[in-house]
Amino acid sequence: MEKGKQLYEGKAKKVYETNDPNLYIVSYKDDATAFNGEKKGTIADKGVVNNIMSNLVFALLAESGVPTHLVRQLSDRDTLVKAVTILPLEVIIRNTAAGSFSKRYGVEEGTPLARPALEFSYKKDELGDPLINDDHILALELATEDDLARVKQYAHKVNEVMKAFFLDKGLKLIDFKIEFGKTPDGEIILADEVSPDTCRLWDVKTNEKMDKDRFRRDLGNVEETYQAVLKRVRA
Ligand code: UDP
């Protein structure tokens, strides 16, 4: 499958048309941004890590009953996916307090939550992706009631499957962000990626941060950490 016209270039990926209107190619870059694009950099071979890791996790999720956009990996950085319209929502699930949740509610990072907490952000860069609730989503017609129910059901399933998967690799799943898309026939499927860019993963024994917080917070060993995560999830 060959890349056609470039449809989109985001912070971490490019998306291309193919000769099949139902299929796109995503190509993962090494560019890294944080704090709504304020901090920029590159992480050598991040694109390779995120592509391979995301595909591995998506394959596992598909087996577990969560439909995904994954068709097949084409190369280290390129993957063939189903063409979807992305819902303008970031779906976040938190198992442990961290990041903006800790700040917003005054809860120390690392505090376990009594139950997984799902939240939505409205994907709108110019507004800084504000927090949004179910009523707002329906009032703004960002998704239908059925779509929203599906998204939540899948998101919790993704959490259960990933928590167990990562724990088996010695990694604690603190929180993560996922995105869903709608196929031309109206099916809601998991899209975008699952990677150290989009998950907080802490070493089970040492609580060492093994994710993009190493870049966001200048903790060092960024490249090494991405490679270490890939090695663990592949093992
Ligand atoms: N996240 C993401 N993209 C975003 C914002 C958050 O992938 O634009 C992920 C982030 O890596 C973390 C989770 O979503 O795993 C929760 O992030 P949080 O809301 O705490 O925001 P942050 O502290 O990253 O700004």
Image (tube, rainbow, N blue to C red):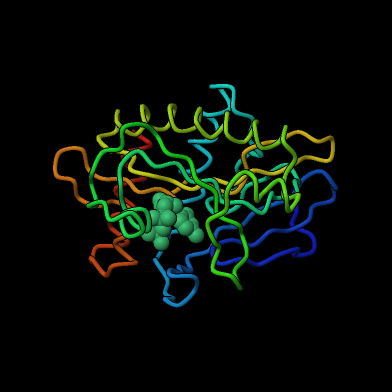
Along the horizontal axis of the image, is 181 left or right of 32?
right
Observer able to see residue 196: no
Along the horizontal axis of the image, is 24 left or right of 61?
right
**Residue plotted at (60% across, 52% down):** 78
Residue 56 vertical placement versus 64 (above, below): below
Name the image quarter holding residue 219. Answer: bottom left
**Residue plotted at (52% across, 56% down):** 131
| Of the pair 199 and 112, the residue shown nearer to us | 112
Name the image quarter holding residue 175. Answer: top left
Question: What is the residue that sits farthest to the top in this orientation?
Answer: 64
| Of the pair 225 and 190, the residue shown nearer to us | 190
**Residue plotted at (43% across, 68% down):** 34
Residue 50: % across, % down? 47, 51
Count the marks.
0
Residue 71: % across, % down? 67, 37
Along the horizontal axis of the image, is 172 left or right of 127?
left
Residue 90: % across, % down? 56, 51
Question: What is the residue that sits farthest to the left in this orientation?
Answer: 206
Residue 43 vertical placement versus 73 (above, below): below
Regarding ligand 1, which quadrant of the image does it lie in?
bottom left
Residue 146: % across, % down? 72, 32
Along the horizontal axis of the image, is 184 left or right of 159?
right
Which quadrant of the rendered structure holds the C terminus? Answer: top left
Observer able to see residue 156: yes
**Residue plotted at (62% across, 36% down):** 151
Name the image quarter holding residue 67. Answer: top right
